[in-house]
Amino acid sequence: MNEAAIVVEGLSKRFKDKTAVDQLSFRVARGRFFGFLGPNGAGKSTTIKMLTGLLRPSSGDAVIEGVRLSQNLLGVKGLIGVLPEELPLYERLTGEEYLHFAGRMYGLPRSEVRRRTEELLEFLSLTDDRRKLLLDYSQGMKKKAALAAALIHNPRVLFLDEPLNGIDPISGRVVTDLLRRMAQKGVTLFFTTHALDVAERLCDEVAVIDRGRIVAQGSLDEIRRQRQVEGGASLEDVFLKLVAADVRRDDLSWLG
Amino acid sequence: MARLIALVLLRFRIEVRSILGARERVFGLLLLVPGLLFFSALSCFVALFGVRALEAAQPEALVPALSAAATVIGLLWCGSPLLAGVALTESHDMTRLLHFPIPLATLVASSLVANLAQPAVLAELPMLACLSLATAGLSLRLPFAFVGVALSFLTILALAQLCGLVLHALSRNRRLHDLALSLGIGLGFALSLVPLLLLMRGLPAFGGVFGFVVRTDIFALSPFAWGVRAAVYAGRGELSGFASFALLGGCAIAAAMGASAHLIHRIYRGDVSLESGMRSAGASRMIFGGPLGALVEKDVRSAWRDPALRTLLLLGFTGPLFFLLVITQTHLDWRSGRPLLLLAMIVGISSFGANALGFERRGIGLLLSFPVPREKLLVAKNLSATLFRLPSFFTLTIATLGLASAALLPAVLSVTLVTMLQAAAVDNYLSILFPVAVPEPGKNPYGGTAGGGRGLAASVIAMLMLGMALLLAAPFAFLAWLPLLLDRPGLFFVTLPLALAGAAAVYAMLVMGAARLLSRREPELLERILGES
């Protein structure tokens, strides 16, 4: 269980004169619930895009479940499931068609695709809307459909970019319970969120990224110790201490 | 007033930035300006000399004719968002401004004033002056005539704005939105055929319509016409006629603006309650197995439900018909089959420019996230493009059977197929090297933030690639056609399989190469398409 599922080696991404991700190196052990946290524009989504093969790194490489990204991109894509923040869905397909399509694209047999589709639709409360076009789904329903598609092939590593955004609290609980169960079964979950309370509740380990660099990594207790934050401090307190040191707090005296 | 000015300036700033944001658009504008100047000069000429000539020859026809012309222009202007098949949701979307405490009348007025300064509108101003001059000459009546003409023009703009808002209201319902787009694209295509039909039927048909319009003066009831009617009466010194039509014109503008403000109010307060547009899509299981089948099925289902893509099927029927119409005007010998050979090559080469990966839009990120061999992706995309062109095969078959002989059919279809294969294979390279995201249905293709075109160099390369596709197809087309040249139909049994097999082999090699290129350039392709769409 302690083997590394994700090994990131000096990953960088530069856009013209801006360095979005700067020499990132870290390891995530198999079966961990790994939270990747950071303020807006810190480089979280860019990192996920690079790790999932959607963006070419300017330098560095990564190994996912023993498969090197630069050498076998398709191999990596077969092992992972991705729930991106912006949902590129085929909106003129129905929810059910979309899951069938995703299953076939991962090479699953027809009967297995049908079985898993039924179960996923049922589990994510989409059964009643299975024959509606994704275009007509609400944002939360689209998120659930995209999550179902990311799960249908039983990935070994799951990359989730803001997975709970737009999902109602009941479905949110169902989804987090499912993710926790997957982690217990050895699936590695790499997820970003702004909801620090969720991260605190779910994650075995977190990394905090700021301006493209990791500023802290470890379990919450380890980070508290590293940063000499008092024992009862929440993840939000730790996070603010790590990345918000130079936030201007001028009074807007004219307000109110 | 300060808010009105700020709103108008905001709109100008956004439009200027969207043009300056991409070299292609600046180039497009540079091309547009001479065109606009030319058409402005042409319309000035027609307005000035045409109106004077008609006034001299048939003075009683002038008012009905101008009324008809103003109405036709007005209707086309109002329908332009629909006819262009785009921008239904964007042209009158004021959602972002509604949070501010701006009176709705100010919003409507700002949109109208901003519309006045559009290049297409400014280009009409000299024509308005010429029309006024033609009706009143250089006399004291000229300013009154100009007021009349300007009233018609403002009526057109105000009613166009109202129509845009109605379309925007419709766009809140996805099904109505799709329906409007489909109708608009079909209507636009039908209208584009009108000049061709007129050329074929000749001027007598036009004369008949003109006679009917003059006899009945049916367009006297059109609000678009009231201003120009006032202008003609002003030119003739008939004060009461001028006053009454000018008053009617003014009322039409006020009514249109009032209706626009009311509609904006109702749309954004949620009073225009259109049903959500959700519906069951019926049986919803994918039929075909394997990644290749799933990809083709996905493309076909998506295209059938997407109004903009569905028109590809319509074009498949009508495109070859159009060329057939052109070819029938020549003196080619149909029994020889040469016109059909030409038509088959034209239909075949239509696969070039299918822009398979661009049609994925944002879905490209999803598509390339699947662990499917890239050659399968490309073959599936090419298969879909060929399926969308099946109606052309149907049209071609009918043309061959109707105009030539059934004996030519295998050769005609084989030439089409081998050309289509090579064109699709070469287009894969273009699609990978110079990807262009196709705008979403109903979205303004020029409204993006990034460069939307391929650029000049890419266009030149595209032309070279088109030539290459034709060159690659030529030997196989020749082989398919050889028995006809030798007048030995029995040879078809040898040459057709050879041609098809050869074309398939070259296609396979090209696809393998394109797949390797795609594997190497995937991230760049994603960056380009996702950045654009």
Image (cartoon, coloured by chain):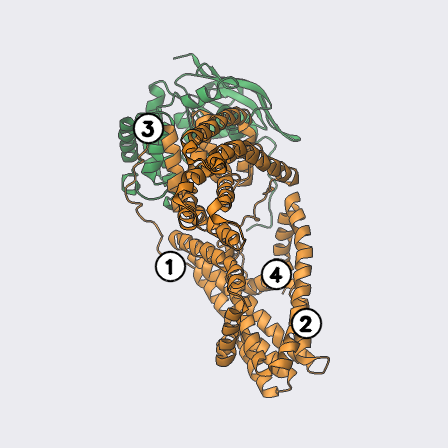
Q: Name the residue beneath numbered marker 3.
A: A177
Q: Is residue B367 left or right of residue B472?
A: left
Tell me how far mark 3 sits from mark 4, CA to CA: 54 Å
B73 or B405, nearer to the observer: B405
**Which residue type does callout 4 highlight?**
Ala
Q: Chain of mark 3?
A: A
Q: Chain of mark 2?
A: B
The quarter holding residue B73 reads bottom right
Q: Name the residue beneath numbered marker 2.
A: B129
The quarter holding residue B151 reads bottom right
- B301 relative to B39, above or below: above
Asked if both marks, 2 and 3, belong to the same chain, the answer given is: no
Tell me how far mark 2 sits from mark 1, CA to CA: 43 Å
Tell me how far mark 2 sits from mark 3, CA to CA: 73 Å
Q: Chain of mark 4?
A: B
Q: Which mark is residue B273?
A: 1
Q: Residues within 10 Å of mark 1 (few under 14, many from 20)?
A: few
Where residue B61 appears, x then y in whole percent? 56, 80
Asked if both marks, 4 and 2, belong to the same chain, the answer given is: yes
Residue at figure coordinates x 62%, y 51% from the top left = B14
Shown colour of chain A: green
B122 or B28, nearer to the observer: B28
B379 or B362, nearer to the observer: B379
Q: Which mark is residue B114?
A: 4
Where residue A11 appears, x then y in whole percent? 56, 21
